[in-house]
Amino acid sequence: MMQNYRMTIQYDGTRYQGWQRQTSTGNTIQGKLEEILSKMCDKKVEIDGAGRTDAGVHSRGQTASFMIDTDKTPEEIRDYINRYLPEDIAVTRLTVAGNRFHARLNATGKHYRYRIRTSPLQDVFERRYVYHLGQTLDVDAMRKGAELLSGTHDFKAFTSNHRIKKSTVRSIRIEIKETPEELILEYTGDGFLYHMVRILTGTLVEIGQGERKPEEIPDIISSKERSRAGMLVPAQGLCLEEVWYE
Amino acid sequence: MMQNYRMTIQYDGTRYQGWQRQTSTGNTIQGKLEEILSKMCDKKVEIDGAGRTDAGVHSRGQTASFMIDTDKTPEEIRDYINRYLPEDIAVTRLTVAGNRFHARLNATGKHYRYRIRTSPLQDVFERRYVYHLGQTLDVDAMRKGAELLSGTHDFKAFTSNHRIKKSTVRSIRIEIKETPEELILEYTGDGFLYHMVRILTGTLVEIGQGERKPEEIPDIISSKERSRAGMLVPAQGLCLEEVWYE
């Protein structure tokens, strides 16, 4: 009998061309997982992921759903997948889900974390998981900017997808944490547009560098013009931490 | 004028054949650093490291000394070295040292950390820095064993160097920390023999698995026989955290 499953996937995105399977021979997380599940079921299996993370973006909480017919228990499916996955991808949780559960369509919120290394010295153990900026930033100004960005807005200026036809209104909250070596930007919200977290971060970094003022934020938002917002920061500082449902 | 320097080096040991330069063409941390310093000074420079970490062992606190004649400031030397180092090695601190300072001979203590992942699930972000055991251990028994190993003993049974002629007496302390996914073994002491931390850890793991009793420890110590002690656990779980002086 066909049964719906939900799984949580952790990955170091460094070596991959992102989450989403590509028509060509791209090396993707979704592709790896589908390959293993298709082998296990001896038929083509497709999975739906909650967040289509870009090339180089990491995950601790990516969530996906898929429907298969198998005699294996959820734990056996998880162990089977993990046995064949490369060491930079792991399924951390796999459970039976209601038949109407869809990881992407049912997601009600997501948490992304962007890490900026402000210390001039690299940390070799974190080198793949931070954006190595190597300079201190004006955190107070950035926090003012983050406050003006938080809330429900049309974020059209903060996406690289120019031809988007669906609504670009999202409700988000940005919190900035500080350690002696890093700034950690916590993004939570009901959804994020293509490149949105990285463009928001780039805009806040430019505020932190004194190149922009936080007071410009409302104008950038209302312009709806990508060119008014800040740079796209590197993918490697970004991690999808959690996906929420219900 | 020749001047003595002291530096702290962080490295992800995964790709290296250990700290110590080899006569052949080995890929070593010491070799990389000497190559860069020799290039900078346009003459052969040799450095002395406090701990000769094995192939695959990591460091956050390796300390080395070297004597050179240069116009550069310590900060400029550090930045020069870091510019040419691969991304898995970094000099985190570099200062002028008294001319009698020798990183290995003057070291009075060291701190090593050994991480054992007890969770059956891998953490992809930590995969290179833990020994993935994947099973829970009897931590109370291990703590009893750690207590019997702590103190001043002849640790000849706990080294792979059978032909050692110098004293094998060392004073150490072992502390075991527990998280839901890991056991973290903290080793501090005035010195450690070749493979000693990894054999001590292997012995404690076997106690945690119920294959040995903590009460056997005094007998193993007094036997001075390598064959009586436990297995050599993998290098990748080990990190040289700090070296003390004075």
Image (cartoon, coloured by chain):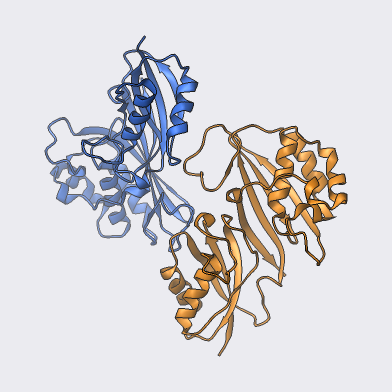
Chain colours: A blue, B orange
Residue B138 makes an appearance in the image: yes
Q: Nearer the viewer, residue A234 or B40?
A: B40
> How far from the left and from the top, in percent, is residue B118?
61, 35
Above or below, B136 relative to B216:
above
Residue at 32% from the left image edge and 45% from the top image edge: A146
In the image, taking residue A27 as reference, residue A79 lies left or right, namely right
Q: Position of residue A127 (x, y in %)?
A: 43, 54
Q: Looking at this view, is A63 or B165 the one in front?
A: B165
Where residue A88 appears, as percent x and y from the top left, is: 43, 41
Q: Quadrant of the C terminus of chain A?
A: top left
Residue lying at 43% horizontally and 74% vertically, measured from the top left: B80
Q: Is residue A81 above or below residue B37?
A: above
Taking the view exactly as shown, the residue that stands out farthest to the bottom is B1
Q: Nearer the viewer, residue B125 or A174?
A: B125
Residue A91 in sight from this viewpoint: no
The spot of residue A215 in percent (x, y) is 24, 50
Residue A86 shown left or right of residue B136 in the figure: left
Give the residue at the far top of this rendering.
A1
Total count of labels: 0
Is residue A199 or residue B137 the one in the foreground? B137
Image quarter hosting the N terminus of chain A:
top left
Q: Picture quarter containing residue A244?
A: top left
Reply above or below: A134 against B79: above
In the image, A126: left or right of A227?
right
